[in-house]
Image (tube, rainbow, N blue to C red):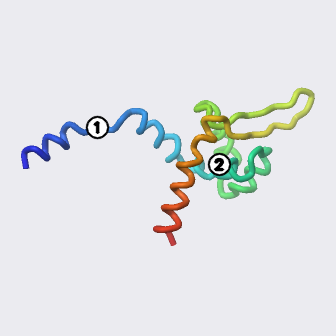
Amino acid sequence: MEHSNRQQDDFCLCPRFEHTFTILGKKWNGLIIEVLFNEHTQRFKDLAAHVDKCSDRVLVERLKELEDEEIVQRNTFPGESRIEYSLTKRGQELAPVMSAVHTWSDKWCD
């Protein structure tokens, strides 16, 4: 019994793992990433239509946070007011994670 207590005391979460869950666990981030996986490049209004329960203000915040994490890139077009969002290479590498979430949710969520 003493051995198992020592193992529990020695355990600590990896800071990188914690940071990853801070990003992916934040409300709306997973849905934003999923839309960009499936729809690729999206204008704000189209992304907002897919994540329709998220307010525009919060969507702007989340997109900025995902940009800061280099998961999403904001594409502007000189001379146009058009802005589009897409996944970066880092964001695209979340594909197996998102696939695993789909598999888990298909099995366990009704």
Left or right: 49 as drawn, with respect to 16? right
Left or right: 20 as drawn, with respect to 71? left
Left or right: 11 as drawn, with respect to 53? left
| Residue occupied by mark 1 | 12
Horizontal and vertical percent position of residue 65: 60, 35
Horizontal and vertical percent position of residue 74: 73, 34
* Residue 50 numbered tag: none
**In which quarter of the view is residue 71 placed?**
top right
**Neighbour tally class for label 1: few under 14, some 14-19, many 20 plus, Cα within 10 Å:** few
* Amino acid at the residue labelled 1: Cys
**In which quarter of the view is residue 93 placed?**
top right
Q: How many marks?
A: 2
User: Which residue is more in the foreground, 53 or 38?
Assistant: 38
Residue positioned 46% across, 43% down in the render: 21
Residue positioned 86% across, 31% down in the render: 77
Q: Secondary structure at mark 1?
A: loop
